[in-house]
Amino acid sequence: MTRKHFIAVAEAIRTSITSREEREAVARALIPALSESNPNFSKEKFIDACIG
């Protein structure tokens, strides 16, 4: 996956889940698979993008 894909996933999480805690939980659940798909994946940036 590319940065563009990660941004799209984070935006979908941020806009479709109203609870901050749930957004963070979903983001953290996806981290293992996403970090495996791209060695430059930043966990911190992804969580920040998901939480908003």
Image: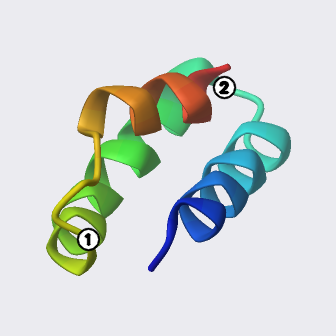
The percent coordinates of residue 19 (x first, y second) are 66, 26
The secondary structure type at the circle numbered 2 is loop
Image quarter in which the C terminus is found: top right
Q: In this orientation, which residue lies closer to the viewer: 19 or 39?
A: 39
Of labels 2 and 1, earlier in sequence is: 2
- Where is 22 relative to 52, above or below? below
Disc ID at residue 19: 2
The spot of residue 47 in percent (x, y) is: 42, 31
Which residue lies at the image location 52% right of the left edge and 35% below the top edge?
Answer: 22
Look at the numbered discs 2 and 1 and tell me whether their residues touch, using CB distance below 8 Å. Answer: no
Residue at 44% x, 80% y is 1
Q: Dot 1 corresponds to which residue?
A: 38
Residue type at mark 2 is Ser
- Residue 22 left/right relative to 26: right
Q: Nearer the viewer, mark 2 or mark 1?
A: 1
Q: Amino acid at mark 1?
A: Asn
Q: Is residue 14 left or right of residue 2?
A: right
Q: Residue at x 38, y 39 (%)?
A: 25
Q: CA distance from mark 2 to mark 1?
A: 28 Å
| Of 2 and 50, the residue lying toward us | 2
Residue that appears at 16% across and 64% down: 39
Percent across and percent down for residue 27 are: 41, 46
Answer left or right for 35 relative to 7. left
Residue 28's tag is none
Secondary structure beneath dot 1 equals: loop
Q: Position of residue 29 (x, y in %)?
A: 29, 56
